[in-house]
Amino acid sequence: MSDTAAEATDRRVFVDKQSPKAYHALVETSEAVRAVAAEAGLDRVLVELVNLRVSQINGCAFCLDVHTRAALRAGDSARRLGVLAAWCETELFTDRERAALALAEATTEPANGGAQDTAYAAARRVLSDDEISAVIWVAITINAFNRVSVLSRHPVRPTP
């Protein structure tokens, strides 16, 4: 196979660009979920923690880049973001954040029913029904964006 033919078969389709109507529907869903989260009383830092943790699990470099910057703008610290992958091993996160992170992980890996039950029980102790619903919707939405970016291989480029 020639180099040009190999490049053509290796090149990923940017599904967001290829199917803009579907992508715009996902963006609209994200905007609705952001409003639901705000109405439920979830602050931007907590929402970004969920976005980041789900993106870590899914290995989505593009979304990690976007949401790290968003979390820092929202007021989170580089220290907390640096240990987010091991959040349950630290004392840097509140009970509400810990419950939301566990619920986000369970939403991302739904086949683990035991972890899902444990996360849901923990969430019930510190989050309202509206907050639980909002966290789950945030996790569902970022999971969808992760798949778009991972399968499209959206690049993360240096900023000028």
Image (cartoon, rainbow, N blue to C red):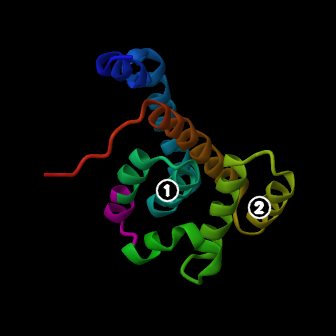
Magenta span = 69-76
Where disc 2 sits, the SS reads helix
Going by the image, does 57 lie left or right of 23? right
Q: As drawn, is 141 to the left or to the right of 160? A: right
Which residue is found at the position 36% from the left and 18% from the top? Answer: 8
How would you rate the neighbour count of disc 2 (Cα within 10 Å): few for under 14, some for 14-19, many for 20 or more? many
Q: Amino acid at mark 1?
A: Leu
Do the CB atoms of the residues marked 2 and 1 lie less than 8 Å apart? Answer: no
Q: Nearer the viewer, residue 136 or 79?
A: 79
Residue closest to the eye, 58 or 4: 4
Residue 131 drawn at (x, y percent): 65, 55
| Residue pointed to by mark 1 | 52
Q: Position of residue 73 (x, y in %)?
A: 31, 62
Of mark 2 and mark 1, the one earlier in the sequence is 1
Task: Report the Cα–Cα distance between label 2 and label 1.
Answer: 18 Å
Q: Is residue 12 left or right of residue 98?
A: left
- Name the residue type under label 2: Ala
Residue 143 in the magenta stretch? The answer is no
Q: Is residue 73 magenta?
A: yes
147 w.r.t. 68: above or below: above
Dominant secondary structure, magenta = helix
Residue at x-position 77% and y-position 67%: 122
| Position in image of residue 27 (x %, y %) | 44, 31
Query: What residue sits 63% from the left and 79% below the top?
Result: 89
Q: Is residue 135 above or below residue 150?
A: below
Q: Which circle marks residue 119 in the picture? A: 2
Residue found 63% across the figure and 62% down from its top: 101
Image quadrant for the N terminus? top left
